[in-house]
Structure formats: C-alpha cells, structure tokens
Image (cartoon, rainbow, N blue to C red):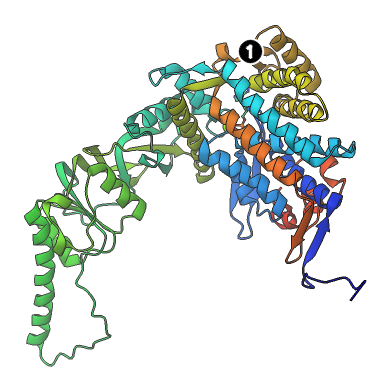
Amino acid sequence: MGNQPLIVLSDDSQRTSGKDAQSMNIQAGKAVSEAVRTTLGPKGMDKMLVDSSGSVIVTNDGVTLLTEMEIDHPAADMIVDVAETQESEVGDGTTSAVVVAGELLKRAEELLDQDIHATTVAQGYRQAAQKATEALDDVAIDVDVDDTEILEQIAATAMTGKGAENARDLLSGLVVDAVRTVADEDGIDAENISVEKVVGGAIENSELVEGVLVNKDRVSDNMPYFVEDANVAVIDGALEVKETEIDAEVNVTDPDQLQQFIEQEEAQLEEMVDELVDVGADAVFVDKGIDDMAQHYLADAGILAVRRVKDSDAQQIARSTGATPVTSVDDITEDHLGFAGSVAQKEIAGDEHIFIEDVEDAKSVTLILRGGTEHVIDEVDRAIEDAIGVVRTTIVDGKVLAGGGAPEIQLSLALRDYADSVGGREQLAVEAFADALEVIPRTLAENAGLDPIDSLVELRSEHDAGETGAGLDAYTGDTIDMEAEGVYEPQRVKTQAIDSATEAAVMLLRIDDVIAAGDLAVADDDEGDDMPAGGPGGMGGGMGGMGGGMGGMM
Ligand code: ADP
Ligand code: MG
C-alpha cells in the first residue's frame, strides 16, 4: 500500500485546492458584484433580462437581477445570498450589499498576494465590521412614526433612479400611508399591504384603498354590485353539487326520472344557499366554482358572490374582515362571518374589481399601481416594495442615516483611525475594509459620469471637517448636505449590508478546498477585473454557469 495514493473521491468529482480555490471563489464573487455595479444609485442604469422562454424583465433592482440571472457557481451563490438576506431583512440596499462584498473580496485578494494569511484578513474584516456598525450609531438620526416628511423622504430615496422616479412624491406619500395604516401593536406586517397592478393610465393615477381588492366580477349580473355593512363569508371550496367519486353512469329511462334528478340537484343547491342566507351572509367569496343554479338563488337572496378567488386574496379578505374560511357551507355559522362596511364592484381602467373596504379586523390596504405597460408597472412595483421595506424598517427601528455615500465615507475615516490602534497585520485588513466601503460613493460617482477621485477627495475633506451628512449629488456632481436634500436611508440598510457582506467575504476567504460532485465552472484568474461590467463576454468567460443566463441578456 505504501506510496499508493488513496482515492476517496469518485471519478466525476472535481477538486480545487489551496490558492486556486481561494482565487476561484474570489473571482466568482467579484463577477457577481461587477454584474450589478452599474445599476447603483440615482443614475444607475437598468438591465434587461431575457430568460430561456423569452420573457423579459427590465430592472434596476439588485436582488431581482441576481435571482433571475440563473447563476450557478457555489461561491457566486453565496454572494447572491447576501442580496437575498438584505431583501428579506430590510427590503432595500441589495445592490450596495453585493457591491461591498465584491470589493471586500477584491481587497482581500491584494492582501493575500502580499502573503497575508486568509485568517488574518478574516479576523481584521470582522473587527472592522464590528467597529463600523458601532460608528454608525454616532451619526444616526432619530425618527418617529409621526415624522411624515422624513418617512416620505426615505421612501423617495429608495425609489430614486427606479422606474417610479416620475411619480416619486405621490408614491412615497401612498407608501407611508399604507405602512402606517397596517401598523399595530404587533408590529408591521407587510403582507397586509397588497399591490394591485393595473395596466392603463399613468403612474400618477395610482391610489391607495383601505381594504382588499379582488380582480374579479361578481359572478352574476343579477347580484347587487354594492352591499353596505356586509357580513362576509369566505368559502374554501365550491358551491356546486359534489361529483360522485366513482364514474357513475346514471341511466335515465323516462323523462320524469330526469326531471327528478335535476330537481334533486337544484334542491341541494338551494339548501346550500339557504345555509348562507340563514347565517346572514351578504357577500360570499368562493375558492372554486359556483353552479349556475346556485348563482340564481344567491342573486334572488341579494347576495354578492365571487367565484375562483385567488388563495392570497381569500386569505387577505379573511384576515381583514375577520372571517374564518370554511370548506363547506354545511359547516358555516355566524361566527365564521367577517364584516366590511362596504363591498362593491367598481371599474379601474376598464377592468372590474371587487373592493372590500371599511374592514373590521386587521387593517389591510391595497395599492393600486397604474402604468402604461406591464414592464413599467412591474419595475414600479419592485421600487414600491423597496420603499415599503425602508419605511417599515424605519418605523420599527427609529434610526436613519443620510445617504448618497455619506455613511460610507464617515465609516471609512473612522476605520482608518481605528486601524492605527489595531496594529499587526490585522491593521492592514482593517484599512482594506475602510477602502472597500468607499466603493459605494465611488460607484455612485462613476455611474453618474463623474470623476470618482475628485468626488472622493472632496467628500473626505468635508467629513474630516465634521460634515457627517456630506454626500454626493449625483445630478450635479457637487458635494452637498444629504440631510438638507432629504436623502435618507434606514440605519439597518447599512448595518445589514456590512454584516452580510463581511460574513460572505469571510466565509469565502476561509475556504481552501472546493470539492464538487460534478462539473464545476471554474473562473480563470484575471478575467473578473477588466471585463466590461456585466458585458456578455465577461461573464461568459468568467463563470461557466452564467454564460447561458447572461449570454442572452444584453
Ligand atoms: P440598492 O439596491 O443598494 O438600494 P440603489 O440603486 O437603490 O441600490 O442605490 C442606493 C444608493 O443610492 C444609496 O447609497 C443611496 O444613498 C444613493 N442615493 C439614493 N438617492 C440619492 C440621491 N438623490 N442622491 C445621491 N445618492 C442617492
Ligand atoms: Mg435602493
């Protein structure tokens, strides 16, 4: 046995070790961050994604880009996770988080090249991240749920540079109203805010409805189109006579028998409707179908009924009116009913909708988003989701920061000071971290067509002089006070981005062995750096897995 190597891996598996593994992971991470970099900030550009079935998404939203891009490289996936965590925790700052992660990896690579050990870099990064989050507390501004102006500015900042830009003022007002309306003692559940996208009209025609909207007609024109003070029933089943389980054939020998059969069915349907009438239901939302005969009896009883209601709509109706869904009308009692001051059918852009308003229970709102085309509305919707996220986070945490690169410059200065006290080789890592954070103002400047060096020099000197809110006006290129400009972001957008970017970078740096069961797309060394950001060639070459997804992209 002596010198015979022991083979423990299968033939198909691929192994990359040591520096190669590190380098491969770093390239993959950098490639992901390069792909979204140009979308950052008010002057960031959009990207068009075409999937294999030919459907198109035009977006500026980091997390949407990364999740739709069909990335398949394990290290790249970890950077995509950073965006996803950011999205679920705060709802905004996904591009920033990924760009910072990429920059941390890039700076780490330089340190590794100087023979600084990966664990030392990791240690220095962790210390720096910790220090950075503390330093943010010093510049954070307190905000209260009644600070309408700041809350609207926060929503507007999140929507800057997105499709929603034109109607930013109107939309930020609607978002703040929406979030405040659904807030209660238990916090803010964004599930209670639904967005109804309506193609037709302009974004400026968007509005907020306090209640739930169902994109359906009432099932029969003979039903009332408006019910006041409605008892609402939600049925998670059908108003039909049950089909027999077995394929039974009913042989009818004479017309009387047929008549009898039909009458029996009708009687059953009438009974079902009677159950609803007896408990006092005025509006009925049914998951499945409603038989024609049942429709007739319902209309006779003056009940407004809607069939084939989407699950998510049914849940929201139940939550907001206080109704408990029943699977069959046989079981229904008064206790299952909810209440709404008004249930009415109204038209938006030629499309009938049922409005359930003045609800009794959990507060629930629907944002009606209007726009010229579906693609426009989809992108506005993503901007709105970001805005809802930041307003909710702000109300919960009560802390915001000025935007436009101000916090990153502030932190970078604070970390350079701190680095002196760290000493040893970790000091270099802390300094690298400080440099890495400046990627945000630098990219904001680059994307706005400004000279990044000039902008950084100016920003640093303002911050040195104590202007903690000094940031980059992407429109004029001037260094301005972001607070006066009303550009705010929740503090958590920054702390979360720093935390998850650091975690991902550290995790990737500590890996010195990649063992893959199958074929692994390996990034080659110098591809990541000089590729045109997001250009088809660059990604294709850098990361095998992405070649397909990105190839058709631009
Ligand atoms: P992310 O996905 O990271 O939120 P965005 O494209 O939304 O990416 O860009 C966010 C960055 O743009 C933040 O650093 C924010 O401070 C900055 N920003 C937003 N509005 C402005 C503005 N009016 N002027 C300068 N910077 C802005
Ligand atoms: Mg944003």
Residue most toward the bottom? 253
Report the residue at 78% width, 25% height from top.
Answer: 431
- Which image quadrant for residue 14? bottom right
Q: Which residue is mark 1?
A: 468
Residue most toward the front? 2
Taking depth in this image into account, of 85 and 46 the one nearest to the observer is 85
Where is residue 5 drawn, in percent x and y? Answer: 88, 70
Relative placement, left or right, of 249 versus 175 is left
Quarter of the image for the N terminus: give it.
bottom right
Q: Amino acid at mark 1?
A: Thr
Q: Check the image and report above or below for 465 versus 356.
A: above
Taking depth in this image into account, of 214 and 226 the one nearest to the observer is 214
Taking depth in this image into account, of 345 and 117 the one nearest to the observer is 117
Where is residue 275 drawn, in percent x and y? Answer: 10, 60
Taking depth in this image into account, of 474 and 29 the one nearest to the observer is 29
Q: Check the image and report above or below for 200 versus 42.
A: below
Where is residue 333 drawn, in percent x and y? Answer: 12, 55
Relative placement, left or right, of 290 versus 209 is left
